[in-house]
Image: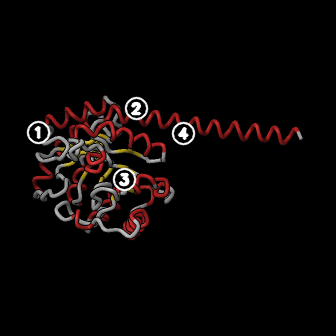
Amino acid sequence: MGVVNVTPDSFSDGGRWFDADAAVERGVVLLSQGADLLDVGGESTRPGAARVPVDEELARVLPVVERLVAHGAAVSVDTTRAVVAERAVERGAVLVNDVSGGMADPAMADVVARTGAAYVAMHWRGHADVMDAHDVYDDVVGDVRRELAQRVAALHAAGVRDEQVVLDPGLGFAKTGESNWPLLAHLPDLVADGYPVLVGASRKRFLGHLLAGPDGTPAAPEARDDATAAVTALAAAAGAWAVRVHEVAASAAAVRVAARWRDAQGDTTARHATTGAAREGAR
């Protein structure tokens, strides 16, 4: 999933793709690098970001969604607002990527149920201006799984079908630093809950802290892409459905490596099973 930020204040690109023409051009580049989905967002969710008026979000997002769909792209819309989701789906978006998991707008679940769009429910505890204060967990893996299960139950109650749902552990959202790593290490547990899992680690703060210089200054967002690709490989090997990234090429290569790695593990298991059966039959 390649990120197309149609915002002037993204933490990762500082508004480079804010103009609609530039955003569409960026999306086309990401497709050429191997993106399967383009995630178009018109409201920054960086820590501390303020909300934008709904009319402004619509004006930013809809033309880009429509033009990328016309280009043949599979497009997701990154929004917490039901009206933006519905209007984007009307223009061809196939997935709604909601960082609030439906908590920011009570109408979201109904829109997802009525449109039949795929829906990413992310773990969330508050908007960008307050989320850091909610980085308090007894057991971050258990707490996130439990809270995501509650979101799934709410979606079911609104008529959303299982096959529409994708889960996202919400790296960096109400998780300022160390609490992100257990979620990645235990990603197979979340995968085992039975839903496709989206991982959004790209250029996040916790990678900047990991790669900090000798003076403790976090690495700049653009300097976190190699670490992002490493997370992609590990997430893919752990069974993630997709990764959301700002730079696609290296992560697309990492996904291919992980797929071959898993295939080879399966081949080895099959060979061992066949050899064991042959030995047993010879006794």
SS of the residue at dot 1?
A: loop
- First reached walking from the N terminus: tag 1 or tag 4: 1
Label 4: how many Cα within 10 Å (few below 14, some 14–19, many 20+): some
Q: Quadrant of the C terminus?
A: top right
For marks 3 and 1, give the CA distance.
Answer: 27 Å
Task: Give, as a three-letter code, the residue at label 3.
Answer: Ala
Task: Give, as a three-letter code, the residue at label 4.
Answer: Arg
For marks 1 and 2, give the CA distance.
Answer: 29 Å
Horizontal arrangement in the rendering, residue 82 relative to residue 36 (left or right): left
**Front label number (3 vs 4):** 4
For marks 3 and 4, give the CA distance.
Answer: 26 Å
At x 29% / y 43%, what residue is drawn?
A: 211
Q: Give the label on residue 118, or none.
A: 3
Q: Give the label on residue 19, or none.
A: 1
Q: Residue furthest right?
A: 283
Marks 1 & 4, CB-CB < 8 Å contact? no
**Front label number (1 vs 4):** 4
**Front label number (1 vs 2):** 2
- First reached walking from the N terminus: tag 1 or tag 2: 1
**Residue 241 at x, y percent in the picture:** 43, 47
For marks 2 and 3, give the CA distance.
Answer: 25 Å
**Residue 15 at x, y percent in the picture:** 12, 42
Q: Give the label on residue 262, or none.
A: 4
- Name the residue that disc number 2 marks: 253
